[in-house]
Amino acid sequence: MKEYLWSTAIGALGLCVTAQAQELKPQVAAWLAAQTNIQSWSADFTQTRSLKSLSQPLTATGHVWFQAPNRFRWELGHPAQTIALRAGDALEIVYPRLKRVEKYPLTGQQAGPWRDALALLEAGFPRSAAELEAQYDILSQTVQDDSGQLVLQPKSAAARRMMPQIMIDFDTRNDALRATELQFADGSRMRNDFKNPVLNPPIPPDLFAPPVPGDYKVVEPMKKQ
Amino acid sequence: MVEGAHRPGHVPLPGLKHPGRWLWLFLIVPVALGLARLHFDVEVFDLLPTNLEAVEGLKLYQQYFANARELIVTITGRDAEQTEAVARKLADELRANSQVASVLWEPPWLEHPEQAAELMAYLWFNQPPAVFGELTNRLAPDKLTDTLAATRDELATSMSPQQIALLSYDPYGLARLPESVAGAAPAFGQGQEGFSSADGKFRLVFVQARHELRTYRECQEFLTLVKGAGARAVAAPALPGVRLGFTGRPAFVAEVSAGMEHDITTSVGGTAGIIAILFWLAHRRVKPMLWLLTLLACILFCTLSLGGLIYGKINVVSMGFAAILLGLAVDYAVVHYQEALAHPHLTIPQIRHVIAPSIFWAAVTTISAFLVLNFGGLPGLGQLGTLVGLGVALAATIMIFEFLPPLFPGRNQPPSSGPAASLETGGEPTPLALVAQAPARAPRVRTVAAFAVTTVVILTTAGILALGFPRIDTTANALRPRNSPAYAAMDRIQAELSQQHEPLWLLIGGANVEQVGQRLNQIASVLSTAKSNHWIEGFTLPTPLWPDPQFQAENRSIALRLANEGPLLRQVALTNGFAPSALALTERVLESWRAAAQTTGVFWPTNPMSQWIFSKFAARTPTNDLGFGVVTPVSTNTAAVSHTRLAALQAELPRNDVWLSGWELLGSAIFSRVESNFWKVLAPMVFLVMLSLYLAFRRAPEILLSLAVLLLSGACLLTTMRLVGWSWNLLDLMAIPLVLGTGVDYSIFMQLALRRHHGDLDLAYQSVGRALLLCGGTAIAGFGSLAWSSNAGMASLGQVCAVGIGSNMLIAIFLLPVWWRAVLVRAASHHSSPGGNAGPPTGPGNLPNGFALTEAPPTTPSSLYRSEFWRMGLCVVRTLPAWLCGALSRAAARVYWALAPHRRTVVINNLLPPLSDDAAAAHKKARSLFQQFALKLVDLWRYEAGLNIDDLFGPTSGWEYFLAAQAQKRGILLVTPHLGNWEFGGPLLRQRGVRLQVLTLAEPGADFTRLRQGSRARWDIETLVIGDDPFAFLDVIRRLEDGATVALLLDRPPAPSAVTVQLFGRRFAASVAVAELARASGCILLPVYLPRVNGRYEAHILPPVPYERATLRDRAARKQLTQTLISAFEPLIRQYADQWYHFIPVWPPDSGTPGTTNGGQLEEALS
């Protein structure tokens, strides 16, 4: 019932935008080409959530690690209040305060809503132009001074219903990711500003699959009764 | 053929007059009423038997949970986006249509999230008070700020977009339902679940009509409307690859009704076409063909109307009756027409007279075969059986009386009295047929070929069937339409929405909400155990959502208190950084709680979204509540294992008001019912077949040959089914009695034709074989046309019947005659050569002379003349009033007249000489004789039962002759023929103080003889049984010499005492015993007779017959005395011909010339 209620609120916010395929600008193409060189990446970030239901934005800081091709770890809050881990076809959300681990499969029939969630976390880490264009329509490309901006629209109708637009801001001088901003259907926004990025740092494997403390409760909310 | 002249022993043909065409007017009223009442029933569930849990469950589901107005559109596209676009577009267009009440293309809570608040409020309100009470803690005024801070914190750190979205509009976390509810209702909460496949390429759109769709035409119109919208949604812009499907009740009803129309047009049209072609090929005449088709159309129309009168609704399976009826009804016309062409000298009434009995019997067996389908356990098939039975009865009547007259307008006159035309071939076998000379032809090639084919067929069928019999399909698939897009769409939904196994439906009823709730808890426990035992894979019950009146009552005060906190909650939220829009959900929940607190009974959510959800699992009637759940069975490879597990589960479930149902259970349940009822269908048919074979042949070899045809054709049917992969299913099992009932006729007709033609194969084929081919062809066409039926079961029934009947027909026409010759010739050879030395056959058809292939007339009394029936009669007359006994006996006589043509023929033959060979008069008198005999029998039973019969005596005459004879003290021999009620002479004489001794033959069975002796003894009448022992007469002579009064029957003597005299100018066997007793005792001979006149028996004593005792030493003189006696009765027999009771032939063959004297044994004994 809980999931149903989530979808209730989200689902009402539908928006359709027609997208046209575009030629990539050289800076954008270069940034995308540079993505293939990333084997690992980490950075601090500040997340700003501008929600329509709140009069003031919410801000949180955290750290992100990325390991090609698709492993990541997001930690939000200091100390971490929420940790999102992706390993293979599963997504784990750890709530240290609640001593709770939620596991979500990313394949199968129940994965739909969480595949959408994954889009939030993976936005900004395309591996190639082809991969980008497979998932998104490029609504606009803006290059100004040393800043390049891509505005994307998810091709998936479900993802688009939740998140009509994604903006990626990168540095055209070093092809480093500066920020991502996700716009929700009701106009709310979630922006991640990255700083202190480190390219190809060594990342211990268990960072993406940390052992679960014994006093944590592990649940699989999507598993059928 | 002899015309205008009558030969002894040759039955002139009377006619069967048309009773009057005005009688058809009586049909108008029922037909009109039936038409007015007639409706077509396209509900598959109405085909199912009642009193089965699975069926009741399905019907309840159909009634309360299947939305009769809802059409489901399936959309299959290349990708999720395309599919969603089509769904949305279709929804938009249909919502603009005034015929559409609502369209759902995605879960309603996604389109109208504001409506979810009421459901949330309900779910909280329905919790145990302790759980609901926790909410009051969370929303306590002093904790509101902390709650909102926690929400903001979560909003800042949550990784879940859904959680972020929801918390944004639910700052107090009212949507966080207790685990028990949230975990138990996942099906309602996962995005597009229930509306879309996982990949989004398959979607559902639910379209509800604004008005009830009561008729199939309304369903068709609604389907057309939605299809049109669907086509437009796909067409502009063109979306190649998008496929639409339509299912749900309106689609099923539209499809089934269209199938019915198709079935009627194709099967009826096809059958009628084949009939026309076959008739044309056989006769090449247009007028009779068109007239035949016209009458067939009338028969169909009337039958359908009468079906409407009886049933009101004709269901889809029953519509198959039309083609079957056509195939059967045409036979009656063909037989008539064939006969009319073959015998151009006969009038139509005469042809009717000849054909009507055989049509009557054929119709009776066919009607019986179809009527027994009512015992099969499938109401739909029973209805079909009744319709065909009704139609066959109607067809037989119409064809008998109406088919020929317009085709042969010059032959409509009934036969005139006097010598009449007669029939040598066809119709009832007559003694003359015995001497008909048929050419003897039995080509060796044909014999060899027939036996070779027989051998090949036997070996082939045995070989194939040794590998296995056709499989048995215990599913309910036979009840489904074939090639059904609606079913295909439904199957697709099941596949795409990942329901790996077709779920079972569980319906839980109760007098009120509490009772259903209790049962749900009870069932949940049973299902959990079943799941742990691996009897089932899983289950979903509406327990968490089912209202709990007790909790609700206890929660009312809490709900009201929370509702009253609304302004505070709003104020605190705004001061903690939330926008006013964030409180929409909270405020709606509070409003719902306020509404719930103000209700007095059970609180049900009422907005459209909640109603949509609740309509899936809860139904309320004025007297009952119903809950709906699903059970997922465990996937197994064997149906038996699955059935065993489900049976175990069913045994554990509560007995009352709980129904476990579903197609899988339905099939096995119905099959079990059909299986258990099968004997009720088969046993009467086997009995009927055996009875008809016995009545037709009365000889073991021919009965066995017919059974051999049935067996071999059965083997052919099984082999065909095995080869082409057909299976026995719910419906085509019923083909067995149908094939038996209709197939047996072919072997009967063929063997009777062989008898008539003395084994001449060519003649038999020409006269009957070709007609059977035509009749069989039309029957096969009728059944075979069902192969294209839109209903799977009807198609298989038609196929199986067509093959079964076809096998019967072909074997009967082409193989049976050769078998028959082989068996009967051998038997005949044995018959002619005792000791087994079979000599070469001689005579007609290469059969020995005297071996009567034609059915000989009966020479013994009816088998009904036996002690058991006699006792029954005595019992009946003691029990019932006399008038009722009389009415019943006359009715029985009418039935016997109709059912015993051989006996009827005998009586008509017997009456011809007294009536100057007037065939019509003989026929009329014979019919009257049966009636008179029935009345006499009742009176006789009354007499033998010891009842008062004084009122039965009428006037007497000639008593003075008796007194005069008595005075001479020489002994009196009362002589009478079988005229009137001779038995009543005894009681009449007793009334006058005379003790009578009756000379009789032994009755059939010692018990019967004793019974009748005892009855007479009750009246002080002594019975002297002489049997075949001529020396028994010595005692009689002694008694006569002592002056006794003895009664003796003059005609129909036993062989030892028979002497041939002349009666009506014919040779006639009379008893010489009278003359012998006169010679031996010198008694007085008094002829007497007791006819029934105006309901009373008159006793007439004629003057004594004088004789010279001394001259009686001469044999010729004794014969002369016998002649004198019999001649005395000649005018009386003529006068009371309908009371001259002889049911075995009294005229010996060739009785036109005087024969030799018999009675030698008796003479020897008395000399």
Image (cartoon, coloured by chain):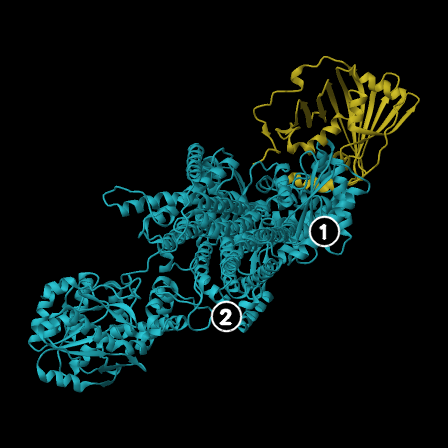
> Gap in Å between the C-alphas at discs 2 and 1?
52 Å
Image quadrant in which you'd find residue B821:
top left
Mark nearer the N terminus (2 vs 1): 2
Q: Is residue B363 above or below residue B823?
A: below
Report the amino acid beneath label 2: His
Residue position for label 1: B224
Callouts 2 and 1 in the same chain: yes
B1162 on left or right of A222 = left
> Which chain does yellow denote in the image?
A
Q: Is residue A134 visible?
A: yes
Residue that carries the numbered disc 2 in the rendered image:
B18
At a point 32% along the width and 79% down the height, the residue shown is: B1135
- The chain holding disc 2 is B
Front disc: 2 or 1 = 2
The picture places residue B163, in percent across and down from the top left corner, at 70, 36
Which one is nearer the viewer's eye here, B157 or B1094? Answer: B1094
Is residue B1108 left or right of B158 when viewed as pictured? left
Q: Nearer the viewer, residue B673 or B708?
A: B708
Percent from the top left, x then y, of residue B1051?
23, 70
Return the chain for callout 1: B
- On the image, the x and y values in percent for residue B983 come to 21, 74
B716 displayed left or right of B1074: right
Identify by letter the chain in cyan.
B
